[in-house]
Image: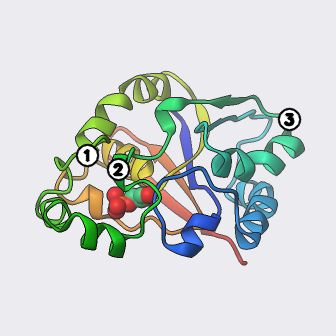
Amino acid sequence: PRHIWLSRHGESEYNLQGKIGGDANLSSRGELYAQALPGIVRRSGVPQDTQLVIWTSTLKRTIQTARYLQAETKWDQLEWKALDEIESGVCDGMTYGEIEKTYPEDFAARDQDKYNYRYRGGESYRDVVIRLEPIIMELERSDNIIIVTHQAIIRCIYAYFMDSSSDKSPWMEVPLHTLMKLTPKAYGTKEERFKADI
Ligand code: G3H
């Protein structure tokens, strides 16, 4: 790949309530990020006469985030189920406080080994890395892709390109409303970040 752009979806209604999972709409701030995204992508430097391809998950918050970018650029857009957020099973729709209260042992086990901990009825980071294999393969043979997805998914894609360890990558903070541009080189990957002013 020449460049890979990565962004979380804009802030969602669930983000505001501290809930995980679900399929919420963007909040009004998230909507502002969606509107700002075409400008941020331009500012990040798209090589001249280059068409990017926009990849989103199948969840509303990523599709809504890419909406203005797609409308403005007319770039091709693809929705991938494999880019959906880590499946939190029985914990879907709960806050971390509620999870800790309802499933204290699970909460502690996840803290102990976040990469391998699998939500009841859901996934672990290890599971996510496996389901991302086709995405990584497709990325490896593509030139310029912009991916609008979710925090856990970005952690895994980022770890692959930046070669970060599996015990640290599930803890990496991926800020909202920030576009990352990765440029793989022969030795290591260059990273740039562009923060939205909203
Ligand atoms: O909704 C889930 C988060 O984006 C992933 O967060 O794996 O740190 O709980 P976590």
Q: Is residue 72 visible?
A: yes
Give above or below for 19 relative to 49.
below
Say which label, 2 or 1, has the lower sequence index. Answer: 2
Disc 2 Cβ-to-ligand 1 distance below 8 Å? no
Q: Is mark 3 on a helix, strand or loop?
A: loop
Q: Name the residue under label 3.
A: 74
* Left or right: 108, with 141 as reference point: left
Residue 11 visible in this rendered orientation of the protein: no
Q: What residue type is labelled 2?
A: Val
Q: Mark 2 points at which residue?
A: 90
Identify the residue at horizontal 40%, vertical 41% (top origin).
185
Q: Quadrant of ligand 1?
A: bottom left
Categorize mark 3 by other alpha carbons within 10 Å: few (<14), some (14-19), many (20+).
few
Task: Classify mark 1: helix, strand or loop.
Answer: loop
Q: What's the residue type where badge 3 is placed?
A: Lys
Assess whether mark 3 and mark 1 are in contact (beta carbons under 8 angstroms).
no
Distance from disc 2 to disc 1, alpha carbons, whole Å, reads 6 Å
Which residue position is annotated with label 1? 120
Q: Is mark 3 within 8 Å of ligand 1?
A: no
Q: Which image quarter is the C terminus in? A: bottom right
Mark 3 or 2: the one toward you: 2
Q: Do the residues labelled 2 and 1 touch (CB within 8 Å)?
A: yes
Q: In front: mark 1 or mark 3? A: 1
